[in-house]
Amino acid sequence: MQDYDIRDISLAPSGHEKIEWVRNNMPLLRGLEDEFRETKPLEGVKISLSVHLEAKTAYLCKVLAAGGAKMSITGSNVLSTQDDVVAALADDGLSVYAIHGTTMEKYHEHIVKCLMQKPNIVIDDGGDLVGCLHTDHPELAGEVWGGCEETTTGIIRLKAMEREGVLKFPMCAVNDADCKHLFDNRYGTGQSVWDSLMRNTNLIVAGKTAVVCGYGWCGKGVAMRAKALGAKVIVTEVDPVKAIEARMDGHDVMPIAEAAKYGDFFITVTGCCKAIPVSAMMNMKEGAIMANAGHFDAEVDMAGLRETAVDSREARKNIMAYKLPNGKWVNVIAEGRLCNIAAADGHPAEIMDLSFAVQAYSALYIKEHHGELPNELIDIGKEVDEKIARRKLAAWGVEIDKLTDEQVKYLNSWEI
């Protein structure tokens, strides 16, 4: 197995082609790349990045490098790394440490290697870089000004650190920006999850029952796309308000123990562990298919399933089948890891154009305001969201209305 930097240039051409494809479909980042190349706003800034390492992420890295940043790059999931994309980045002279399908031990070694440059800014997806800097290698955190977190799961971890008073530097809550979660979590997750399920199973969705565990923005997107594909949707929730939303959106709502009896497809998007416990699996139909779209592989209880199963086999590429003690076989996509990126190509380029624009602006914000910010989660702010949204609309050739002075006065007055 190759160690750390992948420099097999035979892989590079296909990686370069993938990056060029997404570049052509990411007008926001393309515009930022042109600006950054001219102004060099990140000149000399050391950025360490851990995000699912495929073409869209690679293009974000190239944009930041165009702005003068010294990039050190690793993946955020052992199955989502695409080796040809890694090779393309290495071919372009960027420091990159990732291999598809490596061991968890090697994965953590790659994270440490990525942090060895003692970054000024960290860009994280799920919190592994931040976690490493706070636990295993705090000595590498001395030059960190702050960072940016991409995911709901990462924000949950950061909030816990903030509550306990252990967060060593400010972190921009990229996931909470409107231009991220309203589109990435809903439309991106919705489309990419079903892309993964359909390409890996080659089964029809119409007429089936899809059980969606969790009805946050990701769950809403997954349920919406399932319904559009002709599936009946059941939602499981622990939040009573979100359960009402799901019911009013036309979905059935019930506990997972009951939903297990009806589902053909099960998708977890909760950010919590054991959203599908083994006890629920025992009630599933023969051939039920489970997939996780949350960051960690704990949402489907894979440890419990492997311990309980009396037999297992590879049913198809990216699908493992497990025989339960009751004689039924159930299936899991991508070992319970993020199905839409570990067993597909992730979110569409146009969606990640918005999310990664938020990342880029957040990195600039950290650079411009370091030393002024508290060691807390930092909101991106309405101004950045509006700037990104207006640039996206302009790229589409879409115009919208503008408030007149009279309307502004009316909206800011308490008098009728």
Image: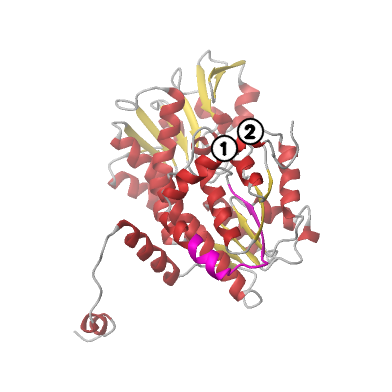
Residue type at mark 1: give it.
Pro
Q: Quarter of the image containing the C terminus?
A: bottom left
Magenta region, residue range: 33-51
Amino acid under disc 2: Ser
Q: Is residue 135 above or below residue 81?
A: below
In the rendering, at what x and y percent does residue 216 appear?
Answer: 43, 49
Q: Secondary structure at mark 1?
A: helix
For the point 43% across and 52% down, the residue is: 26
Q: Tag 2, which secondary structure?
A: helix
Locate the N terminus by quadrant: top right
- Residue appearing at x 60%, y 30% in the figure: 302
Q: Is residue 36 magenta?
A: yes
Q: Which residue is mark 2?
A: 10
Between residues 306 and 41, which one lies in front from this camera angle? 41
Q: Is residue 150 above or below residue 40?
A: above
Mark 2, Cα crowd under 10 Å, few <14 / some 14-19 / many 20+, is: few
What is the residue that sits farthest to the right in this orientation? 139
Question: Do labels 1 and 2 touch, CB within 8 Å?
Answer: yes
**Residue under the image location 35 percent in, 24 percent down:** 204
